[in-house]
Amino acid sequence: MGRPRNVIERGDLVLRRWRGQEDFEAAFTLIEESLDHLRPWEPWVARHDEEHTRALLGRCDTWWASGEVYNYAIVEDGTPVGMCQTARAAEPGGRRIGYWLHPAATGRGLATRAVAALAEETFTLSEVAYLEIVHDRANTASAAVPRRLGFTELRREPAAPPVAPAGSGTAVVWRLDRPGRAADPSAR
């Protein structure tokens, strides 16, 4: 099984693998400054504290080694402005992409550019047949990213608990198949 690159560069935008505890200060500050922005959509924010951030960064190395999750800082002009990741999906050959930005970094296409870079990199892994993005139906900002990048809405289903405070309770699942690969009609 291959691994994505530790650093993915796209001009002034860089995805850089989180480097365990040496990135603690940057990660903690990024999350701390984004709490109000994230709270409506991310249930994990309720558990945010130094210990939780240290534990997350500690798991990043283990997840990377196992291929379970590849977690990146979204870096603009040398400063972390968000996070994105790709995690194993439930079905073989699939990965799910998640992303969020600091509130000062929103509205400029950075999430779309970061997800595009991560998708391109993830498709270099031979075992990856498709990517999915899942978001709450009410989160229209998150919905814009897969729509812009050519993902297809597959289905709407009950959101897995815990439901985010601003969430509708309905998850929207989008899919993008590996370029050159026909979509699997049974996945719909």
Image (tube, helix red, strand yellow):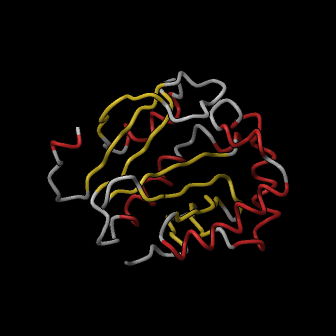
Tell me if 49 is positioned left or right of 167 in this view.
right
Residue found 38% across the figure and 37% down from its top: 173
Place of residue 66 in the rendered image (x, y in percent of width and height, measured from the top left) = 50, 73
**Relative to 14, residue 171 above or below:** above
Relative to residue 98, is residue 135 depicted above or below? Answer: above
Q: Is residue 7 above or below residue 135?
A: below
**Image quarter hosting the N terminus:** bottom left
Q: Nearer the viewer, residue 72 or 186?
A: 186
Q: Residue at x 84, y 50 (%)?
A: 49
Where is the C terminus found, in terms of image quarters? top left
Residue 29's quadrant in the figure?
bottom right
Task: Give coordinates of residue 182: x percent, y percent.
Answer: 14, 52
Q: Position of residue 106 (x, y in %)?
A: 62, 40
Q: Residue at x 75, y 68 (%)?
A: 23
Q: Horizontally, is 28 left or right of 112 in the view? A: right
Give how far across and how far down residue 177 sits, in percent.
Answer: 26, 52
Residue at left offset 38%, top offset 52%: 90
Q: On the rendered structure, is 151 left or right of 19?
A: left
Q: How many marks?
A: 0
Q: Horizontal placement of 112 versus 25: left or right? A: left
Residue nearer the viewer, 169 or 142: 169
